[in-house]
Amino acid sequence: MNDIRIPLTDKSIVQLATPKEGWYLARDTELKGFFVVVGKRKRTFTVQGDLRQGGRRASSIRVSIGDTRELTTRAARAIAKEYLAQISRGQRPKTAKQDGEAGLGQVGNEVNTEVAAVTLRHAWQRYLEAHLVRKGRSEKTISGYRDHVERIFAEWLDTSLGGLAEDPARVAEKHDEITKDNGPYIANGCMRTLRAIYNHARKTNRSLPRDNPADAVDWNEEKRRDTGMGISDLTEWFRELAVLENPIRREFHLLTLLCGSRTTALQQVKPSHIDFHSRTLHIEKPKGGRKRAFDIPLSREMILCLIRAIRVGRQMYPLQSQKWVFPGDSESGHLAETKEDRDTLSKWGNDLRQTFRTIATAAGVSEFDAKLLMNHSIPGVNAGYVTRHKLLEDHLRSQQQAISTAVFSALGKFLTEDAALRGWLGHGASRRATSELGVEPGAQGEEQDKMRRAA
């Protein structure tokens, strides 16, 4: 068959005709020198360019990028651009074994690069698209990986994974360097990222060494950050929270404590996620993606917290509050940054998740129920037989209420003696919250009735 020229996409490549004999080229109309070699059994992303020396054409270099079944067109095109850039500078793209050495040996006027020549940049691009994005990982998770690769490992982006595997001492030294410059936790996290990307790359690059380069690392000791509060610590924390300037942030931190959920999940809560009739809050995108979505049973205190957040949100952000329970000035329209000055609020974020778990134990809630409430994985084969939504109807809600009751019981007399606490959570504050929602008659009026009945 004759060579053709088409816009190369995943779809157009699948639709290419298979030759009865030999092979042909499907050249990309977007990027010159980028094409697919279409054979009877295999289709291979390839790039070709002229290597010049002294301003003259020395040879034509053709480099195999990878099988179309193992790489997306987008990732292959990114690799092709890098190879073409190297060729334009008079450099030959390197194999894993030749990383840091002289150029490739030639066969005639062509050079074939082994799949093992994949660089960290190439492997990261495929891991990002095929593993993180495709599996619905959160933006926070993806940004963490991206920071490790594109900032911490910036100088290694064009280094082959094979080269790193053959020089484990280099990886161990990098871990020591990151530990010194960025701290032990970030150093370990970066190496876990490198290990995951290498393992993923090796699935389609069997010529990579079996030994993962991250195995050479002497891991830093990591201790669980014990920053949770006990019941005796809650009174002072509530006093700090009561005088927090932004009432939306105040309710956000309180809800974090009462449900023990991750802040990134609560930031994206919408009014439509709240079911006041069944008294549940749907968490659409928790850690692990949509497939791990779950419902949180709501205690009375949690319902009042959400009602106050909705009321204040409508007053402060009329437009954004139509979509988000915790609206803000961010580009997304919801609360984006949840950190506070420790001098203003001593505990927030993961501190409150630890506190929830601590208070749950003090309230007599079993470890199994606490894990279900926090959407943690349950170990053991028997966990697969637990029907969570059946427990949700009565049992888990009663456990949730027990935790909330324990939290607010810690306030005791201070709920009436402290002016800020009394104005926020005291007697009559709940009625004011529901009566000042300001919803219109009709369907929204029904919503208001549900809120009041739930409260």
Image (spheres, helix red, strand yellow):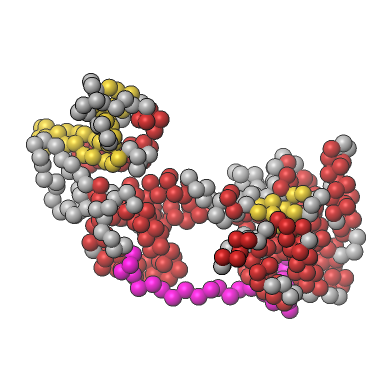
**Image position, residue 5 (x, y; %):** 29, 23
**Image position, residue 21 (x, y; %):** 21, 26
Q: Give the range drawn in magenta.
A: 214-243
Report the quarter where the C terminus lies: bottom right
Identify whether 233 is placed above or below 383: below
Identify the residue shown where x is 26% and y is 65%: 168
**Image position, residue 192 (x, y; %):** 41, 62
Q: Would residue 363 appear left or right of 125 to someone viewing this image? A: right
Identify the residue shown where x is 23% and y is 20%: 2
Q: For the view shown, which residue lies furthest in the bottom direction?
A: 232
Q: Would residue 398 appear left or right of 87 to someone viewing this image? A: right
Report the quarter where the N terminus lies: top left
The answer to whether one can see residue 256 in this image is: no
Q: In which quarter of the image is residue 197?
A: bottom left
Identify which residue, 275 or 312, lies in the foreground. Answer: 275
Identify whether 440 is placed above or below 398: above
Magenta-drawn stretch contains 81:
no
Magenta-drawn stretch contains 220:
yes
Q: Would residue 252 appear left or right of 115 to someone viewing this image? A: right
**Image position, residue 365 (x, y; %):** 72, 72
Identify whether 167 is placed above or below 76: below
Identify which residue, 392 or 155, lies in the foreground. Answer: 392
Q: Quadrant of residue 433?
A: bottom right
Q: Quadrant of residue 239?
A: bottom right
Identify the residue shown where x is 57% and y is 56%: 287
